[in-house]
């Protein structure tokens, strides 16, 4: 029997084993299942698929279930990084998509692109897990991730799967992480800036140069916007620059007119164009 142990909609009848140390299978015995170009399922050894398959380009291998009584259902996130929509199944996952989409080093994103299959060394049962997110970085590194809604440690099947995925990813130079939810203020600020992530805001009203020149040295947000031109026209350009990191601010505090905005770290034109393409 294969048990799909992805966390969304998974039955809760298996007891948690907090603090246990799990034996993990050899990475060479782990299988990967994903959707091929003709929409059929393909299964290959994980160590081979990780090298050959562009998981950031794949459709989800498993749908996101609609759970009765849950206020948040499946949806879509438009990625400024890829120019495409990425599915999500929870508010926590949408928030992590948003954070990764803002990372200038991320060049590819996808949701649930692969199911990992292995035989448990202890019970002999075939088990599976579908990590929620995949991110590709500009230097070729890759991240498989799950997006828990709380900071509580993984337990039960989630903890066992995390141990297996950590080992399997390490064997191929990937990283597996359970992404910690960001602070509420940080999430709210990034969500606000995300409204200006589209490229159309970069030089709206032809104010890009004026906005960037207004913040060649640290300056309060509203004062800089006023110095760049008409405030309502300059603010979208300013927020777009803050989203993409060309300008920076302390997002651990509420974003407002007195927020100190400073020049962002130097990013090459090639890197900027790749991220905003």
Image: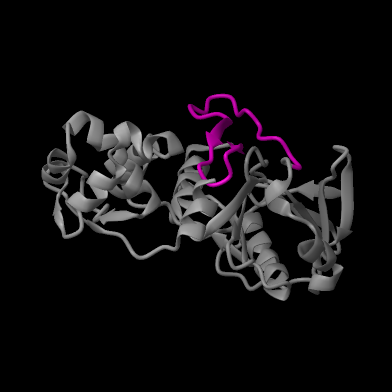
Q: Is residue 16 visible?
A: no
- Residue under the image location 60 percent in, 49 percent down: 109
Residue 179: % across, % down: 50, 57
- Magenta stretch: dominant SS? loop
Q: Is residue 22 left or right of residue 137?
A: right
Task: Please indicate whether residue 175 sits to the left or right of residue 101 in the image.
Answer: right
Residue 158 can be seen, yes or no: yes
Residue nearest the viewer, comparing 126 with 88: 88
Tell me the residue at 58%/31% (across/down). Answer: 74
For the C terminus, which image quadrant? top right
Residue 142, given in percent of the width and then of the height, sits at: 63, 63
Work out whether 73 lies above or below 55: above
* Residue located 14% across and 41% down the image: 222
Please say whether residue 86 is one of the residues in the magenta stretch.
yes
Q: Nearer the viewer, residue 100 or 15?
A: 100
Residue 174's spot in the image, x, y percent?
66, 68
Q: Position of residue 130 (x, y in %)?
A: 70, 50
Q: Which residues are magenta?
A: 61-87
**Observer-nearest residue: 30 or 153?**
30
- Name the image colouring: one colour
Is 224 situated left or right of 53 in this image?
A: left
């Amino acid at each position: 029997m294969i048990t799909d142990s992805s966390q969304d909609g998974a039955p809760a009848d298996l007891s948690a084993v907090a603090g246990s140390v799990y034996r993990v299978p050899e990475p060479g015995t782990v299988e990967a299942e994903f959707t091929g170009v003709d929409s059929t399922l393909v299964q290959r050894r994980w160590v081979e698929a990780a090298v050959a398959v562009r998981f950031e380009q794949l459709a989800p291998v498993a749908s996101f279930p609609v759970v009765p009584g849950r206020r948040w259902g499946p949806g879509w996130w438009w990625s400024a990084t890829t120019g495409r929509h990425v599915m999500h199944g929870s508010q926590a996952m949408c928030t992590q998509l948003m954070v990764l989409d803002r990372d200038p080093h991320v060049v590819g994103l996808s949701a649930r692109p692969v199911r990992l299959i292995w035989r448990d060394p202890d019970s002999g049962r075939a088990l599976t897990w579908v990590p929620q997110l995949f991110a590709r970085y500009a230097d070729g590194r890759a991240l498989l991730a799950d997006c828990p809604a709380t900071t509580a440690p993984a337990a039960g099947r989630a903890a066992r799967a995390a141990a297996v995925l950590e080992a399997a990813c390490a064997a191929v130079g990937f990283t597996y992480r359970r992404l910690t939810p960001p602070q509420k203020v940080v999430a709210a600020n990034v969500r606000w800036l995300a409204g200006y992530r589209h490229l159309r805001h970069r030089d709206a009203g032809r104010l890009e140069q004026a906005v960037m020149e207004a913040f060649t040295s640290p300056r309060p947000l509203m004062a800089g916007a006023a110095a760049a031109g008409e405030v309502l026209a300059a603010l979208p350009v300013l927020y777009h620059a803050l989203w993409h990191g060309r300008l920076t601010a302390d997002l651990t505090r509420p974003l407002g007119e007195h927020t100190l905005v400073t020049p962002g770290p130097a990013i090459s034109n090639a890197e900027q164009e790749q991220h905003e393409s």
